[in-house]
Amino acid sequence: MADMFGRHARVVCPDCSGSGSLIHAKDRCKKCKGAKLVEEKKPLDFWIERGMEDGDKIVLKGEADQEPNKETGDVIFIVDEQQHPVFTRLGGDLNATLKVSLEEALCGFSRIILKTLDGRGLSYTHKVEDKGIIRPKDVFKVSGEGMPLGKKSEERGDLYLDVEIEFPSDDWHMDRTRLDLLRSVLASASSIPLEGNQTNGALPNVVDEVELEKTDGGPFGDDAAGWETESDGESEGAQEQCTTQ
């Protein structure tokens, strides 16, 4: 088509939509009216395989929008793994917190310690005479209780449990009998020797009584702004001379 200045421009034919052929009105589809396209909503079903990770893709072949005389594309879903309130995932392994009371840490226990993602309860018995007491920062591993390692594999990763010991409330010592009983069972704090670089192998001659204040360690190092010194009247390599008045 030419405009008033003699230039040519390409436009899509409004009758055939650029196909080069025209369908007579009597032969046109009543739904698309000859456009060869019908807009409709279609539900798409897909399966999330067990063990899939964040960023994995699910591809539905040939389910994208269709156009005449063109190959239909794919619909691609990308897995967005949400954070779980109990478990943290790293590959095929899972991590969670195992909370135990101070009594359980010292005396042992037998109970359900965790509910798995598939709803099972994990029971565990800890005997201190066989396995020792439980200490802060201990980590336990439960083999085979992690995530599936593939849709066709029966293998699973492992479950790691970080121990968190829950101490009693501050007012538990109000019962003096219980406090004295606990003190008689446990070793006295005064029996812990000073070792290593704390004493350089010998007890100090001068002892000062101090107070310990609880802190989260946040201010540590904040005041390290460097040293500032003042001259005391002496300098290296040269002796200061008297001033003549």
Image (cartoon, rainbow, N blue to C red):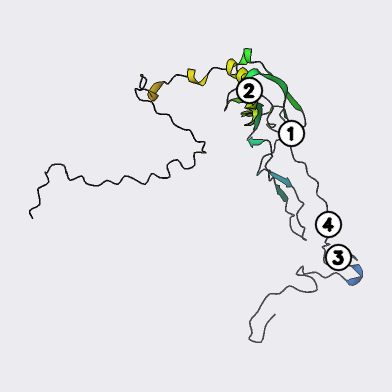
From the top left corner, tell me how far across and down residue 224 is, in percent. 38, 44
Task: Determine the CA span between mark 1 and mark 2.
Answer: 44 Å
Disc 4 secondary structure class: loop
Q: CA distance from mark 4 to mark 1?
A: 35 Å
Q: Are marks 3 and 4 in contact (CB under 8 Å)?
A: no
Residue hosting label 4: 41
Q: Residue 98: in sight, yes or no?
A: yes
> x, y (%) of residue 229?
27, 46
Q: From mark 3 to mark 4, how far is it between C-alphas?
A: 15 Å
Q: Residue at x 9, y 49 (%)?
A: 242
User: Helix or strand or loop: what does disc 3 sit on?
Assistant: loop
Three-letter residue code for mark 4: Lys
Assign a secondary structure to mark 2: helix
Q: Circle 2 is placed at which residue position? A: 176
Between the C-alphas of marks 4 and 2, the distance is 74 Å
Residue 159 appears in the figure? no
Q: Quadrant of residue 101?
A: top right
> Mark 3 — residue?
32
Question: What amino acid is found at the position of numbered circle 3 in the picture?
Answer: Cys
Q: Nearer the viewer, mark 1 or mark 2?
A: 2
The residue lying toward the viewer, choosing from 215 and 92, is 215
Task: Of the two numbered discs 1 and 2 on the same chain, state the one appearing first in sequence.
Answer: 1
Residue at the image point whose x is 67% and y is 35% from the top:
87
Residue 30 horizontal side relative to residue 39, left or right = right
**Quarter of the image containing the C terminus?**
bottom left
Q: Are marks 4 and 1 in contact (CB under 8 Å)?
A: no
Q: Which residue is mark 1?
A: 117
Looking at the image, is mark 4 or mark 1 earlier in the sequence? 4
Q: Earlier in the sequence, mark 3 or mark 1?
A: 3
Type of residue at label 2?
Arg
Q: Quadrant of the N terminus?
A: bottom right
